Image (cartoon, rainbow, N blue to C red):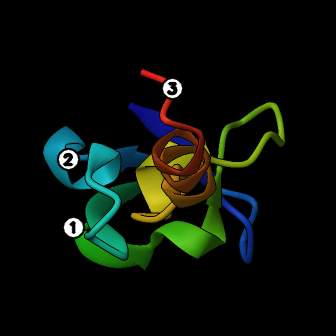
Amino acid sequence: MLLQDQKSGKLVEVLGLTDLYNPLRPGVIARMHYGEEPQDPAHFEKAELRFPSGEPLPCCWTDPHYRDDEVQAVQHHGVG
């Protein structure tokens, strides 16, 4: 998957999609795409990556507690 590094504006190819989707992993191994030669894999923090359109990564990929409020509300109201 191609994402954009916020600092450089360059595209990066994420090499491990499992780490990208796992909210408990703060970073991923990816390879920058620029120049003619493939770049060496490097670690990138998810907080520094965006979709090429400029959209941020989904919360479910970056925040392990993204549903805590929803779960607590269901438990409190007994809905389910």
SS at badge 3: loop
Q: CA distance from mark 3 to mark 1?
A: 46 Å
Task: Give the residue at x 79% y 40%.
Answer: 55
Task: Give the residue at x 26% y 70%.
Answer: 25
Residue at image mark 2: 15
Q: Earlier in the sequence, mark 3 or mark 2?
A: 2
Along the line of sight, which residue is nearer the eye, 73 or 46? 73
C-beta proximity under 8 Å, tags 3 and 1: no
SS at badge 1: loop
Kind of residue sitting beneath label 2: Leu
In the displayed structure image, the side of residue 45 where residue 73 appears, left or right: right
**Residue 32 x/y as whole percent:** 43, 58
Question: Is label 2 or label 1 in front?
Answer: 2
Residue at image mark 3: 79
Task: Give the residue at x 41% y 74%.
Answer: 44
**Residue 31 x/y as whole percent:** 32, 58
C-beta proximity under 8 Å, tags 2 and 1: yes
Residue at image mark 1: 41
In the displayed structure image, the side of residue 21 where residue 67 appears, left or right: right
Question: Is label 3 or label 2 in front?
Answer: 3
Kind of residue sitting beneath label 1: Pro
